[in-house]
Amino acid sequence: MQQFMQLTNEVRNVILEDCLNRYEHGKKFDRKNYDDFNQVKAETLPLFEKIEKWEEEAQAIVHKIAIFPNQIQNTKDNLEIMILHSYFHDVRKKRFMELYQSVMYNLDLVINDEK
């Protein structure tokens, strides 16, 4: 459980915050540019793997944490969408912030339940 909580904190404090920072201040990548695509693919692969690991661990202990299985799946999906939007800036800020707030809320539920 401790390892899962550490992973949850890392997802919240590193991946999620990096997405927000990249969206607000980062370079806008071009989907049609082959070099940009390869750079995004290389940078996001470890992020997607970490999110996948978080989701698997959360589903395994869903009965011990404060969120439902569908919230876990939605959090994973929203995080993956946010990562891509943070590189390509292809969504309005309002929508991006809605995704951000949703993911933050669910991760905070897990973190605050442990305390």
Image (cartoon, rainbow, N blue to C red):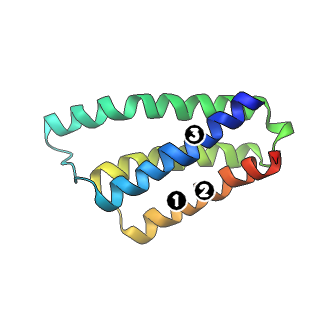
Q: Amino acid at mark 3?
A: Glu
The residue tagged 2 is: 104
When the figure is inspected, residue 80 is found, relative to residue 85, above or below; the finding is above
Marker disc for residue 100: 1
The picture places residue 68, in percent across and down from the top left corner, at 77, 47
Marks 2 and 1, Cα distance to the nearest angstrom? Answer: 6 Å
Marks 2 and 3, Cα distance to the nearest angstrom? Answer: 12 Å
Pointers 3 and 1 in contact (C-beta within 8 Å): no
Q: Amino acid at mark 2?
A: Met
Marks 3 and 1, Cα distance to the nearest angstrom? Answer: 15 Å
Check disc 2 and report its element: helix, strand or loop: helix
Q: Earlier in the sequence, mark 3 or mark 1?
A: 3
Q: Residues within 10 Å of mark 1 (few under 14, many from 20)?
A: some
Q: Quadrant of the N terminus?
A: top right
Q: Is residue 78 left or right of residue 34?
A: right
In depth, the one of 32 and 93 nearer the eye is: 93
Nearest-to-viewer mark from 3 and 1? 3
